[in-house]
Image (tube, coloured by chain):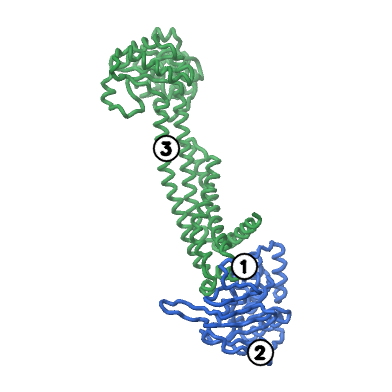
Amino acid sequence: MKNFLFELREGLLIAFRSIRANKVRSILTTLGIVIGVTSVVLMSTAIKGIDNAFQTGVASLGSDNLYIDKWEWFNNDIPWWELRNRKNLTLDDYKKYKELAKLPLAVAPTVWNFNNVKFKDRVVEGLIIQGTTSDYIQTTNLTFSEGRFFNELESNGGRNVIVLGSEVAKKLFPIGYAIGQEVKIRGHKFKVVGVLAEQGSWVMGNFNPDKQVFVPVQNIFKYLQSENLRSITINVRAKNSKMVEATKEEAIGIMRKIRGLSYNQENDFSINQQEGLLNTINQTVGVIQIAGLFITGLSLFVGAIGIMNIMFVSVKERTKEIGIRKAIGAKRRAILGQFITESAVICMIGGFIGLIFAIVLSLIINQFLPTSVQVDALVLAIVISIATGVISGFAPAYTAAKLDPVEALRYE
Amino acid sequence: MNIITIEHIAKIYQVGSEEVHALADVSLKIDKGEYVAIMGPSGSGKSTLMNILGCLDTPTHGIYNFNGVNVSEMNDNELAKIRNKEIGFVFQTFNLLARSDALHNVELPLIYAGVPSSERKERAMEALSHVGLADRMHHKPNELSGGQRQRVAIARALVTRPSIILADEPTGNLDTKTGEDIMALFNEIYEQGNTIILVTHEEYIAEHAERILRIRDGLIEKDEQVKNRYIPKKNGASKI
């Protein structure tokens, strides 16, 4: 061990000496590793950022939720025309289910419509108007910055009340004071009873609750579209995560009964879960991860080839030096160690510089995509760059180590 | 006491389909404290003999005993250890590391011997002072004259306190006067009890030794004692 440390120390001193002696070449060689490490770190950071964004987005759906729907959300096994031919889910189905189901914590129907919302001369165009009941709030994790969700009375009565997503509220009421104001949808007045706190799940696009408004479900059919053209979704929240499976089984049984299916008929509805979305996202992120790291890995590989190339040149150029060292007693291991250390040090320096670039760039990227360089990525980058140096330095170092001292001394 | 005993060694190189006998059959003994010159025209096999004596190469046949150890069968690493501990090389072209200063060049064999840093420095400084370069320790080879470079090389050869000093045409790249200084230095080293083997093709350089081995066509042609050994005088120039 002591011997090894001695050799490592001497190897490092020799390496630094030789790197200093060949400044320009060392810098150019290092550049390949710098670019490689920068891109690998940035890519893994970006992927991590995307993944985090997806995960928070999905988490906002709630892990204990089931969505009974005409459509299978995340499954491509069933051909779409079969899904299309299914009977619509109606508010009647929802009512029957709610009455029969014993296990859910809460049940609420949802149906949505694209429309504009106006307040005086301000308009938010093409947002999603969710129609639901007062129970909806219990099927979500939504929180409020002002006011409340519409209550049972308003819900049952189909009153013209509305809850605004945070972004919608910001656009319509830049200086606040939304509660009690009346906004208009297709000329119909709705009184604002609540404004949601920012949910921040940007990844869900238009389905982000920040960009939605909520009204009692009857209003959708009354003002915006015909009931028999639209299939609803039944949101079901299980009591806890352990109850999700049982709640799902119960739902299947009840829905088959409501839909009047005989034992040999397939389900003509789907029970969707966050899990399905998670699987889809994990698959997607996984593909991005593999493809991204492979592509950036290539740049590191190119850097490694550069190092190997330059080390071969260096060995050739220093044949005489190697001959001298061997003549005065350097063993094979000492020469091997010298060149591997040199290559590892060049790569390590490249790794450090690459990391600094990556951190600076990720701060810039952070303006668009919430991301930060993780500590494990830092450690990994240094380890990878040293490993790259050792691996790509090995073949040249081995050539140097087994040079014949007589031949090497004669080399000019 | 014999430091070197060589019995019937031969070195055969395969050049294409032809065998070249660089050394045909050589036997010799060298005692501790001897000053031996090996002479011969180019192609005589004297370089091959020197490489074998210096443990840079091994013979194809025969036995080489160095300090009672058979080195003819040793592998690369074992030879490296012998070279490091027992042999001090001085080359015609000095063979210093161009980018390192005199001190580091002299330290180098001690690094491979595993000597700790502080002791290394001390011994390297001592060796450099010994060859009259105490004030040139931090000069790089290209900042030194030919004679000074050869002195650094001699200091490097001495620093491990080896059993033999092996000098291959040490004055070949130097002018006569500087060459004479170097030979004076070798004489001094010899008088301090070191064993020196000098390879040269110049009669007058060889006559600095007490014994001359003449090699021709891979054989020892003559092994003679020098009657009137030439003892160089140290002159002022050696203090450059």
Q: Which residue is mark 3?
A: A286
- Residue A164, by quadrant, is top left
Q: Tell me, yes or no, if residue A275 can be seen here.
A: yes
Residue A290, given in percent of the width and then of the height, sits at: 42, 42
Q: Which residue is mark 1?
A: B81
Which of the chains bears the disc numbered 2?
B
Residue A45, given in percent of the width and then of the height, sits at: 49, 40
The residue lying toward the viewer, choosing from A343 and A46, is A343
Residue type pointed to by label 3: Gly
Residue type pointed to by label 2: Gln
Residue type pointed to by label 1: Lys
- Gap in Å between the C-alphas at discs 1 and 2? 32 Å
Q: Which residue is mark 2?
A: B225
Which of the chains bears the disc numbered 3?
A
The residue lying toward the viewer, choosing from A77 and A56, is A77
Decide if residue B133 is on the left or right side of residue A164: right
- Residue B26, by quadrant, is bottom right
The residue lying toward the viewer, choosing from B64 and A24, is B64
